[in-house]
Image (spheres, helix red, strand yellow):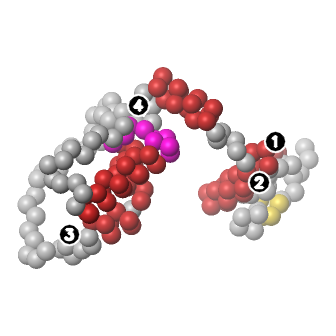
Amino acid sequence: MKRQRQRQCSGCGALFRPDPRNVRHQRYCSALACRQASKAASQRQWLSQSENQDYFRGPQNVARVQRWREQHPGYWRRSGVREGGALQDDSCVQAIETKEESPFLTGDALQDVLSAQPAVLIGLIAHLTDSALQEDIALSTRRLLQLGQDILSGRREHGDQAGHLP
């Protein structure tokens, strides 16, 4: 049996023995950070090739994804209650005593909180529209922005119907 030579990891610099089945290509060791660096480098290399620049983009791929999502409703959502029950019993309710207002509760304005958490806002819009497609989220975001600007400028009164998102 032939003894394998060690190789220096491109991520952390440590010496490691590559897997014999992948010795020609393996440049990273098996540490988590190095595997993540390997994945990132692989994706950068793949995206740098001109034929991959617009891979899965364009109207035909958007239509394909929309058809698939219609055929598989709720695929990307978690199912909720899992079989087998809870891992632990419910905790007893305990009263919370607060002597003064917490700075967490009396902190920033709503606008500051939302601008600091764009992922929450995008997730909320995706949940309200029941779609995770970027085109649908962008359209809904533009509608919500216009509605908010109308409300703030006084063009839309409290009694007006805001309309429903798609």
Label drawn at residue 48: 2
Question: Which mark is first along the chain, 1 or 3?
Answer: 1
Label drawn at residue 74: 4
Task: Please name the amino acid that badge 1 sits on.
Answer: Arg
Residue 155 spot, x, y in % from top left = 24, 57
Q: Nearer the viewer, residue 41 or 21?
A: 41
Find numbered disc 3 in the image and state the secondary structure of the residue it sits on. Answer: loop
Question: Which mark is first along the chain, 4 or 2?
Answer: 2
Question: Which mark is first along the chain, 4 or 1?
Answer: 1
For the residues marked 3 and 2, what is the alpha-carbon distance in whole angstroms? 46 Å
Label drawn at residue 105: 3
Question: Which mark is first along the chain, 2 or 3?
Answer: 2
Residues packed near mark 3 inside 10 Å, few (<14), some (14 to 19) or many (20 plus): few
Identify the residue at image location x=67%, y=56%. 40
Look at mark 1 in the image and give the residue it sits on: 21
Find numbered disc 1 in the image and state the secondary structure of the residue it sits on. Answer: helix
Residues packed near mark 2 inside 10 Å, few (<14), some (14 to 19) or many (20 plus): few
Farthest right residue in view:
2
Q: Which residues are magenta?
A: 128-136
